[in-house]
Image (cartoon, grey):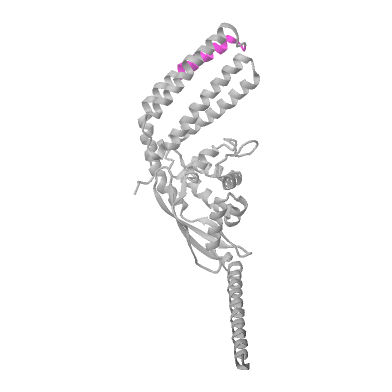
Amino acid sequence: MNHESVKSRIERRRKAQQQQLLLVIAFFSVALGGWLWYHFIYIRTPEYAIKSLQSAITQHDAEKAERYLALDKILSSAYDDLTDDMLRYDSSLTDDNRDRYTAFYAQIKPEMLGGLKDTILRFAATGEWILPDGTDITKGRLLGIDFERFLERSQIRSTELVDEPSVHVTGNQTASGTVTIRDCFTQYTFTLHFSMHQAEDGHWQITRIDNYRTYLDTISPRQNRDIADYIAATHGIVKEYNEQFEAQRTRFRALTAQARGRLTGNTAAAIKALIQNEVVPTLKERQEQLDAVSIPPGAKYLANQRHTSTDLTIEAWKHYLHAMERQSNEEFQTAETLLKQAVETDMRIKDIIRHNTVSQALPDIP
């Protein structure tokens, strides 16, 4: 092997090493560029915030979801829209009553916003709508308003995303976006507009639902129409069985008055027979007839509430019977708790029917 061949081979090897080094440098440059772009540019975009929010909800990461949702701002404006919408179409209110209700909603706003925020974060963490409980001020009707009914009227539990949101920057620290949503009951789709703002640390948050009020005005008349149809279709059933229930309540009150607190002997036997042979079977018959009626999509919540009321009432009576048989205070307390829940549900049903009756000023369905 001559000197020129050795020199040529060394030169080719040197060039090959140089090319490999350049490839390595290029690879790391691209990787570094991608890392820098991701960590210093992309994560500071509204698109990243939306993707992260969707990921947080899917993974039930409430803390991460809260980072990209300015819930205090979103809920504050949404609360004003919702309460104003609730009062606007109530034709039974006088101007003075409307002013008093407006002042009332303003007074309880901080507590309601706290309850709504906690409920939404619990949903983000668990995927379930868990209502306030225990000593929470928004539990039930402690604030003078039915929290569950308020939550239902917000439409948040019955609204789902149809496609991916789209966003675009509109200013130095502002952006806007749209997303197609669908009402789960009526299946009506709607394009929701939202605003975003860039926080001081560079990440973006959704800060407001811009056309939330328009969404309420669009969905409410559709649901109201279906509820009206369902109320009309079940009017005869409800009227017939309400008369039977009233007669049974009268007999029950007479028997308990006769017992004078001593649920034993013949009087106790008569009470048991009334509950087992008449009250519970009548409740079941009524529910069977209600279930046989075709339920319009927008009236499903009302129908579900009626079913819940029936189930709670039957369970309350069962525990009452156990209490009589075992002379158990614990069973009496359980029956009383279930009965209170049934009464709250019945009050909610009445509110829905009343709202449907007085909301005839709702805009026509386009």
Identified at 61% across, 67% down, the residue is 39
Residue 170: x percent and y percent? Answer: 50, 67
**Residue range highlighted in magenta:** 245-261
Residue 58, above or below 264: below
Quadrant, the N terminus = bottom right
Residue 120 belongs to magenta span: no
Marker count (numbered): 0
Q: Quadrant of residue 26?
A: bottom right
Residue 306, above or below 255: below
Residue 129, above or below 20: above
Q: Is residue 207 left or right of residue 354?
A: right
Residue 249 belongs to magenta span: yes
Which residue reaches farthest top? 266
Q: Quadrant of residue 223?
A: top left
Identified at 62% across, 92% down, the residue is 2
Observer able to see residue 346: no
Decide which of 53, 172 is in the foreground and name it.
53
Residue 224, above or below 248: below
Main SS of the magenta part reads helix
Decide which of 100, 185 is in the foreground and name it.
185
Residue 242: x percent and y percent? Answer: 43, 22
Which residue reaches farthest front? 1
Residue 115: x percent and y percent? Answer: 59, 43
Identified at 47% across, 14% down, the residue is 277
